[in-house]
Amino acid sequence: MIKATILIVDDRPENLLTLEQVLESPELEIIRANSGHEALEKTFDHEFALILLDVQMPDMDGYETAEYLRNNSKTKNIPIIFLTAAQKESHHIFKGYDAGGVDYILKPFEPVVLKSKVGVFLELYRQRQQLELKTRELDARLAELEEARHQLELKNEQLRFLSTRDSLTGLINRRRFDELMDTEWKRGIRNADPVAVILMDIDYFKAYNDCYGHLAGDETLRQVANELSASLHRDVDRVGRYGGEEFIAVLPDTDMEGALKVAERIRENVQALSITHQKSPRYNQVTISVGVSAVIPTPERALDQLIITADNALYRAKENGRNRCESLKME
């Protein structure tokens, strides 16, 4: 059971002693005050469930003390039971209620009446404390659930992000690239804007892996991928890993001439990495071959055909000596 603290205020010590004897309980802490001024001071140090306040006291009577308590934000909600030996004329009763009192107890005290009335307000206090405790627990639980929901959203966002990324290079993966490509193709149809595709392949990469090992090969793939990303200067241009040592880029609103300029910049930047490749028959360093195609999409044209055309251009670049860019127009 929640232990409650009450304040008993009376200028006569024998009355305080009587109150204590009647109300004594393991679940109750009783604080004394001999005057209204002392009662106000006690409220700074304690949180009271109830105040038993004598009406007739020198200097500051019970009604004046109650007024001060009611006007203080910390104590305004503490129930006050007035203790009085005076007659119970209606104007006395109304004055007590106006001052913030909730009940009267007449002197001399009837122990049963005193304990009963005090018990009612203590039970209300305990119920209120239990409610506040449950409310805090509920708020804490809701905060935990909100944090859990937030963490779940973060995890889901991370999973969504990871599901679109190639784990080795960090570029978008083929599935995500196909989605982006489809979006750009449909936008090109709506706006009658050209769409360009660039296919890139690291030259003699199998020989590179055989010579330097797969760990070195993975590192080279990462370096090349970073350079490809850095070589695309528009946010709308996207590059992904298309499989193995092959990469692909989509350039919205870009014609063949513009796509060839980007492709050549990419090729030069990869060569400028100066990654040694002793098994490259001609260049002694890592290079790429590049195929380019561009077209204005129409409902009659097929997206796959644009990629096939770029792939044919890539094949031509390899046939013509590698480390070069070739382009083909889509039929």
Image: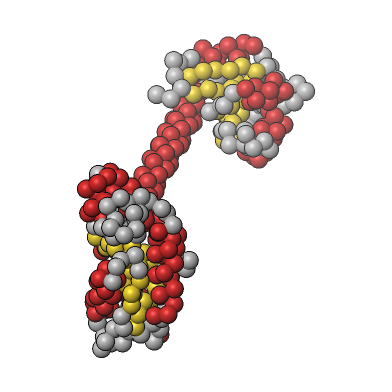
Question: Residue 159: where, in percent of width, then height?
Answer: 31, 52
| Closer to us: 250 or 116 | 250
Q: Is residue 305 above or below residue 241?
A: below
One can see residue 311 in this view: no
Outermost residue toward the front?
282
Q: Which residue is more in the foreground, 5 or 36?
A: 5
Residue 228 position (above or below residue 215) = below
Left/right placement of residue 209 relative to residue 109 reads left
Residue drawn at x 75%, y 21% is 58
Q: Position of residue 9 (x, y in %)?
A: 63, 21
**In front: 120, or 317?**
317
Q: Position of residue 284 (x, y in %)?
A: 34, 54
Q: Quadrant of the C terminus?
A: bottom left
Report the quarter where the N terminus lies. Answer: top left
Q: Quadrant of residue 137?
A: top left
Picture coordinates of residue 64 (x, y %)? 72, 31
* Horizontal side, residue 115 vs residue 290: left or right: right
Q: How many marks?
A: 0
- State which quadrant residue 241 falls in: bottom left
Task: Please tell me which residue is depicted at 72% across the width and 26% down the height of the picture.
Answer: 61
**Is residue 94 depicted above or below 82 in this figure?**
below
Q: Is residue 182 found left or right of 129 in the rendered image?
A: left
Residue sitting at x 31%, y 59%:
282
Query: Residue extending furthest right?
Result: 59
Coloring applied to the structure: secondary structure
